[in-house]
Image: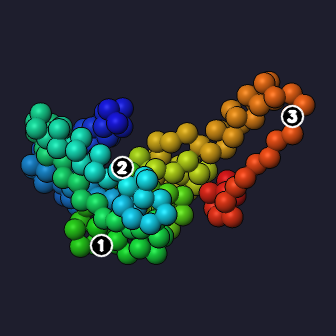
Amino acid sequence: MRRLALLAALALAPIGLAGSSAEPGVTPTTILLGGTVPLSGEASAFGSVGPGAKAYFDYVNAKGGVNGRKILYRYYDDGYDPGQTVQLTRKLVEQHKVFAIFNSVGTASNAAIQPYLNQLRVPQLFVGDGSQAVSQPAKYPWTMGFLQSYVGEGAVYGRHLARTAKGARLAVLLESTALGAD
């Protein structure tokens, strides 16, 4: 969590250097971030990402924020449902005027909002998704992941098994989703 918060502070630091800003979600005293996390539903085990990030931003704010600006973090429970993710992300961007979407969780959820956020040039920071779609800066320049790619993980596991389980019969289980296809 410390590494994530340090990276977030570094990503947001240039905003704090500007004297005044016309950026949505940025005022002379605050930076508003938003996100969706699965507090309920099949992936609720990952729901702690939202409260964890909020707790760390509260800590950073208690220490003076980022260049004097407090980080406000508003997140919603999307139940790990991409349709909900889209609706809630639109609410965060269009109604709450967040500066960026921060650490949204899940391959399908992030795939559902990535084109929308990039079209509007809303930063999609520290995406909780290791799919290859997150690592396409030419196509999605406003998206920045932070997880190891699933393809990279598979390559590491494959090399390890080739070295340590020679001749063994192996099986691979995967989801019939975009995550499994990656």
The image quadrant of residue 93 is bottom left
| Pointer 2 local density, CA inside 10 Å: few below 14, some 14–19, many at least 20 | many
Q: Is residue 39 above or below residue 86?
A: above
Q: Which residue is mark 2?
A: 49
Mark 1 vs mark 2: give the one in front.
2
Tell me which amino acid carries mark 1: Lys
What kind of residue is marked 3?
Answer: Ala
Position of 19 compared to 53: left or right?
A: left
Q: How many marks?
A: 3
Q: Quadrant of the N terminus?
A: top left
**Could you tell me the amino acid type at mark 2?**
Val
Q: Which residue is mark 1?
A: 91
User: Which residue lies at the image location 73% right of the left edge and 28% below the top edge?
Assistant: 160
Numbered disc in front, either 3 or 1: 3
Q: Which mark is residue 168?
A: 3
Locate residue 53, reporting x and y percent: 29, 46
Q: Secondary structure at mark 1?
A: helix
Q: CA distance from mark 1 to mark 2?
A: 20 Å
Q: Kindly report the distance in space between the C-alpha atoms of the residues bearing marks 2 and 3.
A: 37 Å
Is residue 127 positioned above or below 67 on the image?
below
Residue 120 in view of the camera: no
